[in-house]
Amino acid sequence: MAGRGGSEQPQRAEPAAVVAPLLPDDPAVGVLDLLGDPSVREVHLTSRPESASTARRLALSVIRVWGLGSHADTVELLVSELVGNAVRHTGARTFGLRMQRRRGWVRIEVRDPSRALPCLLPVRDLDVSGRGLFLVDTLSDRWGVDLQPRGKTTWFELRVADH
């Protein structure tokens, strides 16, 4: 299943340090040093509900390093939705978070070992669940799912201004 835009692969991400250097005492540097930088390599997290908070902190730290704070709220919400789906619906012990930046785009991926495809469900006003992919579809510029030999990668992309 692919969302808007199909499943083309982005070019290699720019190194974060080239985009927006940070001071050594910046909190974003500490989080990325401690937990790993998903813009450098995939960060593996335990598949528990509280890992959504960790994934959000990592994603927001990278967004800040990249100087894209205006996208922070959208990134925070959509990372929560993708991680929530991976934790709730796959039965996996871990999932991976990866972020890439290329000219005009940011791509955020959540990888899990399940090959079960997520479903974009119709959403009604009184629904209290099932809104995750609806939000991803509504707020991202493109999204999709890439099946892997062992699992899948669910991703979304946002258009961003180049500096």
Image: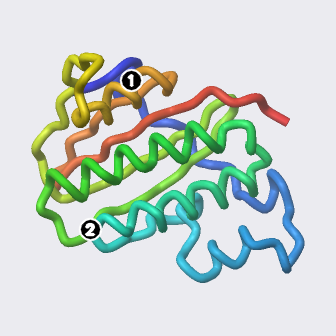
Front in this rendered view, residue 26 or 126:
126
The structure residue drawn at horizontal position 28% and vertical position 69%, both measured from the top left corner, is 48
Secondary structure category for the residue under label 1: helix
Give the side of residue 123 with respect to residue 76, left or right: left
Task: Provide residue 45's location: percent of width, then percent of height.
Answer: 36, 71
Disc number placed over residue 137 in the picture, else none: 1
| Residue visible at 25% across and 19% down in the picture | 123
Quarter that holds the C terminus: top right
Residue 28 quadrant: bottom right
- Image height of 20 relative to 7, above or below: below
Say how the picture is coloured.
Answer: rainbow
Q: Where is residue 66 in the image (x, y as percent from the top left)?
A: 74, 50
* Disc on the earlier residue, 2 or 1: 2
Q: Is residue 83 left or right of residue 152?
A: right
Q: Nearer the viewer, residue 11 or 35?
A: 35
Mark number, residue 126: none
Which corner quadrant of the image does residue 51 belong to?
bottom left
For label 2, count other residues whose C-alpha is less than 10 Å away and answer few (under 14), some (14-19) or many (20+).
Answer: many
At label 1, the amino acid type is Asp
- Residue 110 place in picture, x, y as percent: 36, 51
Q: Do the residues labelled 2 and 1 touch (CB within 8 Å)?
A: no
Q: Which amino acid does label 2 sit on?
A: Ser
Q: Which mark is residue 47?
A: 2
The single residue placed furthest to the right in the displayed view is 23
